[in-house]
């Protein structure tokens, strides 16, 4: 029995019961009080329906033609009447579903906004950028600076050294060089090997090499706070990384390079071990291997970035005061120097801007080389904007590097006729005179370092105004040494050489007439650098040098060999011998095999053969 028929019968029974109840109320006197109601079994309806269907079958067969016609007419009428109503109902249903979906989406978005507001991350879902707090701006380490500065935004397309080399030399030259390197490596392998394709995490600063292992996820980054429109982050070590760090500290205390190599076999992305290996390769002259180790460490640090860490926009801070953040600054500074060594000065400039933006205290001294990279990449307008817009305790032109570099910027801009006639800025000659009057001791050091060998320079250097080597301030003398070490090569250009010479001669002529101006500039210099101690002693001059670093043999041995073995060699005069040419001769007895191999790579180390090696040869009869 169908559900429709069953529903119809039940409705009939209910109506009958209602009628009986009404009749019973009206005719209570006529009906006996105890009259039993007839019992009806509801399952009998199934049998009745079956019987009705069996009886109606022959009649349906006989009158099939007439019923079909009537049904067709009824269907046409009902179709015409029901069609618009069905369409309307469908449209209403679709509209209801859409409104439900929109309401659910808006509810989800509102809930996400409320959650993020509760967490006080300051994130806008539409753009994903950090919103500054509504309260009063707070000072960052007492500097009183805002975090977001457009002048320090990094352009990611200039971070790749390969792209810059293609712009300098052309794609054909770079592609042919890469093909020759691939062919040479395949010949060294002897037979082709199957290339295993690995999926590396997408990064911005470093492009991973094919032979690097996959990122192990041993490092991560956490968000500390949101203050003054900046997000402050810190690197976090996992349990496995902490174990590797403990092993590294033990190997570092014993100067055991063999243990450091074994750490990298188990933990290929241990940052301190990679930095140590890069330093060793640099001291031994393997600059390409040193750069590869540095890039590998920087790739691991970049893979650990927080999703909200967007340093290219200049709105994130990674303070150097946290010990876990220090390797990132060291590695990024080393990578910047490697880009400079390859001639990719625009890439080095972008990395330098990133270093300055990450910590307003500038722990690596990036402010004292950003002018050099700007000049080498011919970003003259940017350097002028940076000196005007970047906030600092002292004015930027008071530093030795900026005082001379801004004069060079204006010199090239004047030559290229980029300055407007209505511009009221000082000329390049005025800026150079100002730099010479403020920092006269730079000239003598540049003449010695460059070197500038014309006879007129002896007259300039021997003058009493330019003849002083020291200024009386340790901080200023240190900054001058850094500037001369980094930027002396720029003054070898003929146009800048003549520009400096002519301006220095005009200053000498002016000094012969009036010396009061020199005393005024001396007062400005003393007031700007009034500290009695060297405030920049943490910056090593050698870190800003382009030459290959060297280290004394004894220090390099301490870097590689166990100090107990070194003490044994120093106490026993028969073991360690040094000849007249400065070559240290050691014995191989009771030494680590890897340490012996690494020491043998040094040109000043020579291993003596033991007495057992001097065996007499057998004479053949």
Image (spheres, rainbow, N blue to C red):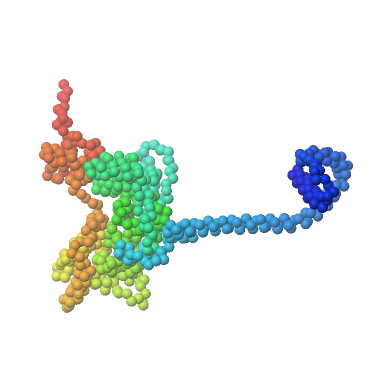
Give me the residue at 74% from left, 44% from top: 3
Q: Position of residue 304 (x, y in %)?
A: 38, 50
Give me the residue at 37% from left, 74% from top: 420
Q: Position of residue 308 (x, y in %)?
A: 41, 56
Q: Nearer the viewer, residue 547 or 573?
A: 573
Quadrant of the rendering where the N terminus is positioned = top right
Relative side of 38 to 262, left or right = right
Q: Quadrant of residue 336?
A: bottom left
Q: Nearer the viewer, residue 73 or 522?
A: 73
Give me the residue at 37% from left, 51% from top: 221
Q: Position of residue 166 (x, y in %)?
A: 39, 55
Quadrant of the rendering where the C terminus is positioned = top left
Q: Position of residue 196 (x, y in %)?
A: 43, 40
List the single residue furthest toward the top: 621
Q: Nearer the viewer, residue 452 or 205?
A: 205
Image: 101 above or below 272: below
Residue 129, visible in the rendered structure: yes
Q: Quadrant of residue 47?
A: top right
Give me the residue at 27% from left, 47% from top: 276
Residue 346, visible in the rendered structure: no
Please tell me how many numbered marks the rendered image carries. Answer: 0
List the single residue furthest toward the right: 62
Image: 226 above or below 216: below
């Amino acid at each position: 029995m169908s559900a429709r028929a069953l529903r119809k019968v039940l409705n009939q029974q209910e109506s009958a019961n209602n009628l009986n109840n009404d009749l019973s109320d009206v005719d209570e006197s006529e009906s006996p009080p105890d009259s039993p109601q007839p019992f009806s079994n509801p399952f009998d309806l199934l049998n009745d329906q079956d019987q009705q269907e069996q009886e109606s079958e022959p009649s349906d067969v006989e009158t099939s033609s007439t019923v079909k016609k009537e049904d067709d007419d009824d269907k046409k009428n009902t179709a015409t009447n029901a069609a618009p109503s069905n369409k309307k109902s469908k449209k209403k249903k679709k509209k209801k579903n859409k409104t439900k979906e929109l309401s659910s989406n808006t509810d989800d978005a509102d809930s996400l906004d409320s959650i993020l507001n509760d967490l006080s991350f300051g994130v806008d879902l539409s753009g994903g950028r950090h919103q500054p707090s509504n309260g009063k701006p707070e000072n960052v380490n007492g500097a009183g600076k805002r975090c977001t500065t457009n002048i320090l935004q990094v352009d990611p397309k200039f971070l790749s050294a390969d792209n810059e080399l293609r712009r300098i030399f052309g794609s054909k030259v770079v592609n042919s060089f890469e093909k020759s390197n691939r062919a040479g490596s395949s010949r060294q392998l002897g037979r082709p090997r199957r290339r295993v394709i690995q999926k590396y995490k997408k990064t911005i600063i470093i492009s991973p090499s094919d032979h690097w292992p996959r990122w192990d996820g041993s490092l991560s980054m956490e968000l500390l706070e949101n203050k003054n429109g900046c997000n402050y982050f810190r690197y976090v070590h996992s349990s496995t990384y902490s174990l590797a760090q403990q092993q590294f500290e033990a190997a570092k205390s014993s100067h055991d390079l063999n243990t450091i190599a074994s750490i990298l076999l188990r933990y290929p992305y241990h940052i301190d071990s990679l930095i140590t290996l890069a330093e060793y390769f640099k001291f031994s002259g393997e600059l390409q291997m040193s750069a590869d180790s540095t890039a590998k460490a920087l790739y691991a640090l970049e893979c650990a970035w927080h999703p909200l860490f967007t340093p290219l926009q200049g709105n994130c801070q990674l303070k150097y005061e946290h010990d876990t953040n220090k390797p990132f600054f060291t590695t990024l500074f080393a990578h910047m120097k490697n880009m400079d060594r390859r001639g990719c000065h625009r890439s080095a400039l972008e990395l330098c801007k990133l270093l300055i933006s990450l910590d307003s205290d500038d722990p690596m001294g990036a402010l004292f080389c950003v002018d050099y990279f700007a000049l080498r990449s011919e970003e003259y307008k940017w350097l002028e904007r940076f000196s005007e817009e970047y906030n600092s305790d002292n004015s930027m032109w008071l530093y030795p590097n900026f005082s001379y570099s801004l004069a060079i910027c204006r010199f090239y801009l004047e030559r290229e006729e980029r300055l407007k006639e209505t511009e009221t800025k000082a000329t390049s000659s005025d800026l150079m005179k100002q730099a010479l009057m403020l920092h006269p001791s730079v000239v003598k050091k540049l003449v010695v370092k460059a070197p500038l060998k014309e006879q007129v320079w002896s007259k300039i250097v021997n003058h009493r105004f330019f003849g002083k080597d020291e200024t009386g301030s340790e901080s200023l003398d240190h900054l001058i040494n850094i500037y001369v070490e980094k930027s002396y090569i720029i003054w070898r250009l003929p146009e800048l050489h003549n520009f400096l010479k002519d301006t220095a001669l005009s200053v000498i002529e002016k000094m012969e007439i009036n010396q009061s101006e020199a005393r005024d500039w001396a007062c400005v210099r003393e007031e700007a650098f009034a500290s009695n101690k060297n405030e920049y002693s943490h910056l090593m001059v050698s870190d800003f040098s382009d030459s290959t670093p060297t280290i004394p043999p004894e220090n390099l041995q301490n870097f590689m060999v166990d100090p107990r073995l070194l003490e044994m060699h120093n106490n026993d005069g028969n073991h360690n011998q040094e000849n007249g040419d400065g070559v240290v001769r050691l014995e191989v007895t009771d030494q680590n095999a890897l340490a012996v191999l690494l020491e043998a790579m040094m040109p000043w180390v020579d291993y003596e053969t033991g007495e057992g090696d001097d065996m007499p040869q057998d004479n053949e009869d």
